[in-house]
Image: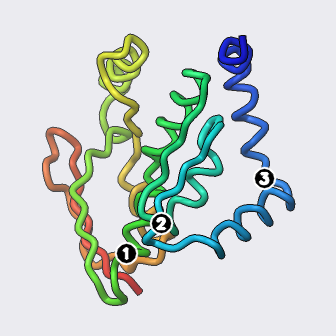
């Protein structure tokens, strides 16, 4: 009964939880002070993964557990978010370290290709995939505190873009 209840409400819950109030921010900041990069965290009742993703940069690994498969699906999709990944890379690199990315920028592909990928995801034959443009990828990397030193098409046919960036 509990799983069914939350499965039906997962999307609405996720939309609401993203509106981080002061109490939520305070909770995250307090938790981060208690955690270290050596820790493995367990987020029991992780819902759509918001808390897990917010503490992920300060721990070695986060395990999210929930009875609702729809909540876990939302959390899994969020975990693949480029912003969290790029910020984590930034935290792990020493100042001056290089981040080299060869990333498919599917937002640069045609609308037919993006439609096919979307359909493949809906029928579960493709995993969640971000459809970033080159400009969006560059903005995410720069926004995480990297200085982009090179940016060039790597494989034009497959819209793969190469970026070399140095941690400031």
- Which secondary structure, mark 1? helix
- Name the spot of residue 146 as percent of width and height, x first: 40, 77
Q: Is residue 158 above or below residue 94?
A: above
Drawn side of residue 160 relative to residue 87, left or right: left
Circles 3 and 1, Cβ within 8 Å, touching? The answer is no
Q: Could you tell me which quadrant the N terminus lies in?
A: top right
Residue drawn at x 65%, y 37% as measured from the top left: 45
Residue drawn at x 33%, y 23% as measured from the top left: 117
- Name the spot of residue 102 as percent of width and height, x first: 21, 56
Measured in 3D between alpha carbons, the distance from the residue under mark 3 to the one under mark 2, in whole angstroms, is 24 Å
- Which secondary structure, mark 3? loop
The local crowd at label 2, few if under 14, some if 14 to 19, many if 20 or more residues have their Cα within 10 Å, is: few
Frontmost of labels 3 and 2 is 2
Q: Which residue is mark 3?
A: 20
Q: Which residue is mark 1?
A: 92
Circles 3 and 2, Cβ within 8 Å, touching? The answer is no
Drawn side of residue 123 relative to residue 162, left or right: right
Residue drawn at x 65%, y 35% as measured from the top left: 47
- Name the spot of residue 74 as percent of width and height, x first: 56, 31
- Which secondary structure, mark 2? loop
Circles 2 and 1, Cβ within 8 Å, touching? The answer is no
Q: Which residue is mark 2?
A: 39
- The numbered mark, 3 or 1, whose residue comes first in the sequence reads 3
Q: Which mark is residue 48?
A: none
Residue drawn at x 53%, y 56% as measured from the top left: 41
Which quadrant of the structure image shows residue 109? top left
């Amino acid at each position: 009964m509990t799983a069914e209840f939350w499965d039906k409400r997962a999307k609405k819950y996720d939309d609401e939880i993203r509106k981080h109030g002061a109490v939520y921010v305070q909770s995250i900041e307090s938790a981060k002070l208690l955690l270290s990069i050596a820790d493995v965290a367990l987020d029991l009742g992780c819902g759509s993964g918001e808390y897990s993703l917010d503490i992920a940069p300060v721990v070695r690994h986060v395990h999210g557990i929930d009875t609702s498969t729809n909540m876990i699906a939302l959390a899994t999709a969020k975990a693949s978010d480029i912003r969290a990944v790029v910020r984590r890379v930034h935290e792990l690199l020493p100042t001056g370290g290089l981040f080299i990315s060869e990333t498919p920028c599917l937002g640069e592909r045609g609308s037919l290709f993006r439609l096919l990928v979307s359909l493949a995801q809906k029928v579960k034959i493709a995993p969640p995939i971000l459809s970033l443009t080159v400009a969006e990828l560059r903005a995410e990397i720069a926004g995480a505190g990297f200085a982009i030193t090179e940016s060039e098409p790597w494989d034009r046919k497959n819209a793969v873009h190469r970026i070399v960036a140095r941690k400031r």
